[in-house]
Image: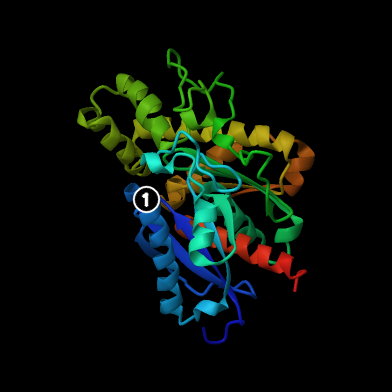
Amino acid sequence: MADSADWVVAGLDVGGTTINATLQDSSGRFLLEEMAESPSCVRQGPDKAIEALARALDDVLAVTGTPRPAVRAAGLDTPGPVTADGVLSSRGGTNFANDEWCGFDVRSSLERRLGLPVVFNNDANAAALYAHHEHFGPELAMARSSVSVIVGTGLGGGVVEMGQVVHGAAGMAGELGHIWVPMDGLLAPGQPTPVCNCGLAGDAESIASLTGIEKNLLPYWLTRFPDHELAGQPASVAAKLVRRYGEAGDPMALKIFEQQAIALGRLLTIAANFTDPHVYLVGGGVVDAAPQFRDWFLATVTEHTTLRQEQALVATIALVPELDMAGARGSAIAARAAVLAAAGGD
């Protein structure tokens, strides 16, 4: 902990298989440059998972040479559905399939185990918070607003206003993937309206997600490209390969990603009319794609985002940086903010 301040906070990002952990000191400096990953053990139930989180904290303290008493708080994020207080849905979740997780209060349980205050966000909100602070920097982050959309297995999102995540009354604010987007001019002739896992037809996630590719877009486009190499692959395998084909300029893959980009543009157009942010941030696997493909995708999103003239003068569309570390770092940022607020900003 050489040359750092006298206290730190932890950021713990929990996924279906791994935990990513980090530390941030009181000045806002992250003490790890790379990801610190460890098994999440969530499939073994809550008890094993909480112990895994405690070990993850111990591991990053050891790596950085930070004494345990220096830790003031921990930030935690998990996939949803989950309340703003960190209580998992009574129906469970994709990454928390064990019945013991249904309705489990993960935040309070970790707080008791660590003996530290735990600040909770869902994973998309944590990533959005980091993207916001990284984009604006410490001087402007607390005076600016952003909307983030993160394309993964589903479509995550987050709304940040004046540097703070907007949670909503039930913790469901920023669920941008489940906003309905217009289909006119987006779908090809005869293409069925995509249906989301949530049951809604034509929401953003039904198109702009890996699940949307597997269940909705790829099955249709393979009927238009029946001799495509992906036609012989299982749907779950083929969906994960589409980006590689898109990077190579494959016509069918580009049709799929064009529809995703149009859907995202229309989603950001809707966001412009209810939150009017300073920046729209786009993240997901496309950020890690080949630069030419990534730039084409972002340009297509931008082309289909309709802003008023006044908005276009002050707003930008940009990429979410360092997505693999964004959840842990966003969780740490939230924890540090809570510590500073409790101390009156000192």
The vertical placement of 147 against 331, above or below, is above
Q: Position of residue 107 (x, y in %)?
A: 53, 53
Q: Amino acid at mark 1?
A: Val
Q: Residue furthest front?
A: 112
Between residue 286 and residue 85, name the one nearer to us. Answer: 85
Q: Position of residue 207 (x, y in %)?
A: 47, 30
Q: Position of residue 257 (x, y in %)?
A: 44, 35
Between residue 80 and residue 283, name the one nearer to us. Answer: 80
Q: Residue at x 23, y 31 (%)?
A: 234
State whether residue 19 appears in this view: yes
Q: Residue at x 52, y 48 (%)?
A: 105
Q: Residue at x 63, y 37 (%)?
A: 268
Please state, as top left, top right, bottom left or bottom right, where the C terminus lies in the image. Answer: bottom right
Between residue 136 and residue 340, name the one nearer to us. Answer: 340
Left or right of 145 in this view: 332: left
Task: List the residue tagged with mark 1.
Answer: 42
The vertical placement of 81 against 186, above or below, is below
